[in-house]
Amino acid sequence: MIRSQQGLFGKFGGRFVPEILLPTLLELEETFMTLREDGAFWQEYLTLTQQFSGRPTPLTPCHRLSGQIGGARIWLKREDLNHSGAHKINNVLGQGLLVQRMGKKRVIAETGAGQHGLATAIMAARLGLRATIYMGADDIERQYSNVFWMRQLGADVVPVSTGARTLKEAMDEALRDWAANSENTHYVLGTACGPAPFPELVTYFQSVIGQELRAQARAAFGHDPDAIVACVGGGSNAMGVFAPYIDCTEVKLIGVEAGGHSLEAGEHSVRLKAGIAHAGIAQGFKTLFLQNADGQLGHTHSIAAGLDYVGVSPIIAHLSQSGRLTADSATDEEVLAAFRRLLQTEGIIPALESSHALAGGFRHAARMNPDQNLVINLSGRGDKDIFNVARAFPQPEWTAFLRRELERQPESTSPAGESSHEAV
């Protein structure tokens, strides 16, 4: 299991927050560190995920895909089959149990693709908590189906219209809210980023993915996978599947970032490639951030809203720089090709975030031997991406539908009821 050294992973991590938040973070850390050693608490968590979310998720062989690509046998760890459609539910259910232990009644969260916001809204409804979700205005337009369900579940969804209007700005607003309301509010941070103890805490709950995979892989083919691939935005799904394997150096760990349109500034979300991102402190922790020469955080792009983030988990940054993790990236074009290939070859609809892992995984599998096994963490399903995918693969009926919808709505109004802006 991942353990920090006083909140640090190598030179990354830490806790750089306003003094008003320090007692709250220390309370959270103390509660988490105590419960982490309590086997009964882990069993309570597992029971909740099994009875409510549908764990364990299966390990699915992709026979036709493996035959087409050649090389290693390809398997999918099916986090898309969780309740809510992604791995995000694992973390929020665990943090919900922590909230109950701390006696707080309100939760806040940031979200990019909307899956973490949806999972938080579901958890709040299940456990009787009030929820406020911060989401970039551009991401609301890209992922409106998730916004609709968050609101139906009773959550207050707050559009963030500052800066690039995506995940970074949503996290900034959530931190401001938490600083003002920390006595009765818990910040359900959605990825393995932020001030200590969040990177370690989120990894702890998401590690259920990798723990299941170890048992499933040994049952399916008798040993650990030769390689495991995950997409990397903030890093929660990657850390979830990688965590039990960190010390198993014979298992190759591959993280695939959003290559976007190109590696020009503002056209991608690549942080791990040498010379692109630089160490810095923002949003309460130290990691690799995309920033300019003056230290100002830069703009990002990805076809997948959940990977459109300027930083990365301090654990991922450390694993990458220490050589334990192999960094890769996939362009928007490669992602769409991988999306379509899985859909038409195996009948599985992946999220665009997960399709980055597919694109990288297919590339690596082709270079491996037929007796080797490569597992791709399919972090989410693609229901939420229907509009973005439909724009990429236009059909006559879809074009006609869009035209009718635009004629019915004022030009200045988006589906979310906010000012309309060009979608990515």
Image (spheres, helix red, strand yellow):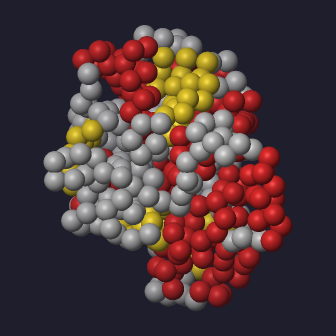
229 left or right, relative to 55: left
Q: Residue at x 21, y 53 (%)?
A: 292
The location of residue 240, given as percent across then percent down, is 48, 50
The location of residue 367, given as percent across then percent down, is 46, 86
Number of numbered labels in the structure image: 0
* Quadrant (top left, top right, bottom left, bottom right) of the C terminus: bottom right
Residue 146 at least partly seen? no
Q: Nearer the viewer, residue 319 or 51?
A: 319
23 left or right, relative to 219: left
The location of residue 344, given as percent across then percent down, is 74, 76
Q: Residue at x 48, y 17 (%)?
A: 185
Q: Residue at x 46, y 42 (%)?
A: 165
Image quadrant where residue 379 sits: bottom right
Residue 279 at least partly seen? yes
Q: Residue at x 67, y 65 (%)?
A: 391
Quick check: 393 above or below 405?
below
The location of residue 245, given as percent across then percent down, is 42, 58
Quick check: 391 above or below 385?
below
